[in-house]
Image: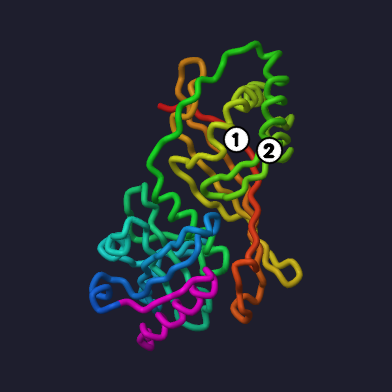
Amino acid sequence: MTKADGSAGARRASALLGIAACAETAHTTLLEDYAKVDMKFSFRHAHEPERLITLHAQVKSGESYRAKSSDDRTLVLGIDKKTIRALSGNGIPGLVVWVPPSPMSRLYWYGKDPRRRLKTPVRISKLQYVRPSIRYDLSQLATYASFTQPSARQTVRDMNPSAVMARAKEAYSALKSATWTHPLAGTLHVTRLAWRHVTRRSRTASQRLIRLRVVPYLKAFLNKPPDRYVCVPKSLRENGKRTVEDRYLLCWYRGALEIAGVTHTLLVRIREQISYPTKWQDLPLGEGDIRQTATLESWWCKKEQ
């Protein structure tokens, strides 16, 4: 097997990351190289244009980094803990970029969850490859890493079940008429989508009731950072000359609600859609060419242990 050309891999990673994230890239100094940093890149936060994000990255090239336990959906990469910890020294998680051998053309990336224990070997979805939506992924990761204050707990009022629907409708109407900016999703649209999802008849009466009781308290969380989140890909398709990604942001607000004396975690699901030119690698790609919308899709709560 031909030995991987690390320098060629680093050049390709720098070029594609720079284009996809609309970023300025730079090679590292000798001191930074000793700290396992191959490249740095800076870009404007997707939802806070005045904020500049600078990330460190290490590039790994070649087949030797892919573990045999990889499968059709998941890549398992042999990246050691020392490398990942070194990249995260500036407070914002750094990236590991894997450049696979030919004929594979996609570059895969990994950024550590700053709030969870580091596990190796690294496991990532095969959908986690470099493309223009990475600017939103990395903006979310940088924002998530800076969260400090938990949201205040809300005590859910006990009321007659017959009055819950009317109060929920009034509260939800107020949510729809307000302007919301979510720390991870930017402008958040509240439409009938989430209401239909929560009140559909396939749910039991008790499931609908508890979700409706929570509606007046959602306003305390829709513009607050969650304690944890995950981004779940749903679909990736071409629509004319553009590629459209649909995905979910699932947000946990731990200890957010007290219902009948019991503490509950609030979960909020946001539908995010991102689109960009399908041939983005062949064109001058600007920030305005990448479009994103976020819509509240559902909410529910779980009892805490």
Asked if marks 2 and 1 touch (Cβ < 8 Å), the reply is yes
Image vertical order of residue 153 relative to residue 134, above or below: above
Residue 118 shown left or right of residue 109 in the figure? left
The residue under the point 66% across, 26% down is 208
Mark 2–mark 1 distance (CA, rounded to whole Å): 8 Å
**Residue 91 spot, x, y in % from top left:** 33, 56
12 is within the stretch colored magenta: yes
What is the residue that sits farthest to the front in this orientation?
A: 50
Q: Secondary structure at mark 1?
A: strand
Q: What type is the residue that disc 1 sits on?
A: Trp
**Residue 99 spot, x, y in % from top left:** 44, 76
Q: Quadrant of the N terminus?
A: bottom left
**Residue 105 spot, x, y in % from top left:** 53, 78
Give 287 or 254, whichever is nearer the viewer. 287
Q: What type is the residue that disc 2 sits on?
A: Ala
Q: Look at mark 2 in the image and give the residue it sits on.
A: 194
The residue under the point 62% across, 22% down is 213
Which contiguous range is marked in magenta?
Answer: 1-28
Q: Secondary structure at mark 2?
A: helix
Residue 187 shown left or right of residue 19 in the figure? right
Give 246 or 184, whichever is nearer the viewer. 184
- Circle 1 residues within 10 Å: few <14, some 14–19, many ≥20: many
Q: Quadrant of the C terminus?
A: top left
What is the residue that sits farthest to the right in this orientation?
A: 240
User: Dividing the picture into quarters, in which one does residue 40 lie?
Assistant: bottom left
Give 242 or 152, whichever is nearer the viewer. 152
Image vertical order of residue 123 relative to residue 200, above or below: below
Residue 7 shown left or right of residue 271 in the figure? left
Q: Look at mark 1 in the image and give the residue it sits on.
A: 299
